[in-house]
Amino acid sequence: MAGDAPPMKRPKLEKDDGWSRHPSAANGSAPRPPAASPSQAPPPDGEEDDGELPEEAVLALIAHHEREVERYKLKLEAAERKLADTRSRLARHRGRAPDRSHPPPTPPPPVQKAAAPDRRTPPPSQREAPKPAAQSQKPPAPQARPQLVIPGAGHSRPAPRPALPVPKKSPSSSSPSLAQAPQRKADKKPKREIVQREHQNLVQSVKKSSAPTTLKFYGGTLVSSQHKRKLRCLELCPADDQLVITSALDGMVTLWQVQSSGPSISLLSTTNCFSSKQRWPEDVAWHPDGDTIFAVYTADGGDTQVSMMNLNTSGQKKVTFLQAKPHTKGIINNINFMPWSDTCFMTGGSDHAVVLWQEKDDSWNHKKVHRDLHSSAVMGVAGLQQRKTIISVGMDKRIISYDVSAERAEYKNLIDSKCLSVLLNPSDFNLYMVQTGSPGRQLRLFDIRLRQTEVHAIGWKQTSSESQSALINQSWSPDGWYLSSGSADPVIHIFDIRYQGQKPCQSVQAHQKRVFKAVWHQTFPVLTSISSDLNVAIHKY
């Protein structure tokens, strides 16, 4: 009699697979397939499970993950090999050879095509003999699904029990949680190697042209940022440059999608990211995988110093806080992920310290890189592409190159003005820019090989105080030839580093008030900007 019970359950599993594309059936089987819902990607089901995101936002996230799979060809090949291996493992449980050796190119089809034969084969064997039916019961349905799904989504893990909130937020991906960090780290290396550019020697052309090369802009589109207070940050997703985030003094972090056609911009989600002491994020950064947003706060009053916002999680667990508090006082001014094979980021604070945070298993370990090399607040930290060396700048007018592996300073450079930020060139790995408070010469270009030698100095007429200019940020164009900068005026300054002159080669009318930052999208000709007018603008060129 015990052998008759499983055949009664099998039709339900087959029905679940066939109905998982429809919201009514998916809701009816919600307790059974928590791990399968991400791969099958039913947009209406995600909308019913999670009330935070509208249907169009869920569809936009689905499109994002599909584009991500198509873009990373090398990673897809690795996923296909893992999928074939998992199918073979499942076939050994069922005592037959795998049905297919070539998985489909995108994550949703493999689960729908592979799961259907697996569900249909047990009933005929059960009619012939009860033994195969008993064997098919050993790998439960929820266990088989993530083994087939996760390789296609780019986060390979053998664990069959993802947290329930994970599939609700993003029905098109396997949505890694903190417990999945070890295997996620193994997938990061190929992703960063794929997007990493080849080094180009741009320094030899810096300041060589007598006339600037200008870009033709086709007007801009402004939309309300939905923030209630002054905007603070604007960051581009490293895995999909159609996604950007904004943060403001209202403590909210907002996710946007920018479409190249039009262009157009749409709001995807808004999340409260106040610290435990109700402090707004001072700076934000994307995890290289593009699934988590990190924010830093202050070290005063025992407040939380670092938070993580998981885009694939909903509810109270969407924003979590790291327990470590290595900074001792003041605001944490900067957070920046390093372009290295191991996942880590640096923070620079008002306590003069630079702290390294490394992803280790399911947690983040921290280590103070240096705290005595700066005599004032550290305002920016950036890592070199070619070796484990960081450049830190501070209000003490110092630029410090530090070898992280050797744990020693390579050189120190004292300039004539306070340093407000540092930005590495995306094409020439030896070239970096330091923002200063000197009117007319705010942006200084340096070659890491020349140490203290300044390669070029450019800037704009400054009509505001130096403290206000600290809120103005810059961004490199994808080819590394142009710098965009905010200004105290409602314009975006564009600099051509080949031009001998110090002034902007052009200024683009962008907003109604001061522009804080404008970022270049990497795969389509659009600039996105934020301003004190509480608007987000997109500009096609």
Image: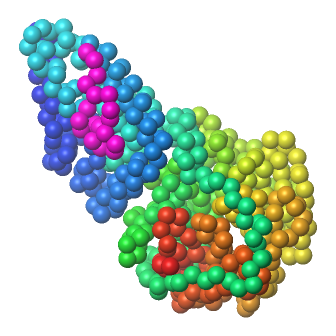
Q: Is residue 108 magenta?
A: yes
The image quadrant of residue 498 is bottom right
In this rendering, does residue 399 appear at all?
yes
Is residue 212 shown left or right of residue 440? left
In this rendering, does residue 255 appear at all?
no
Q: In the figure, 2 relative to 165: above or below?
A: above
Residue shown at the point (78%, 67%) measured from the top left: 204
Q: Position of residue 19 (x, y in %)?
A: 15, 41
Q: Is residue 304 magenta?
A: no
Q: Which residues are magenta?
A: 96-114
Q: Is the stretch drawn in magenta largely helix, strand or loop? A: loop
Q: Position of residue 74 (x, y in %)?
A: 48, 41
Q: Quadrant of the N terminus?
A: top left
Q: In the figure, 421 relative to 209: above or below?
A: above
The image quadrant of residue 305 is bottom right
Q: In the figure, 538 relative to 309: above or below?
A: below
The image quadrant of residue 94 is top left
Residue shown at the point (58%, 41%) measured from the top left: 189
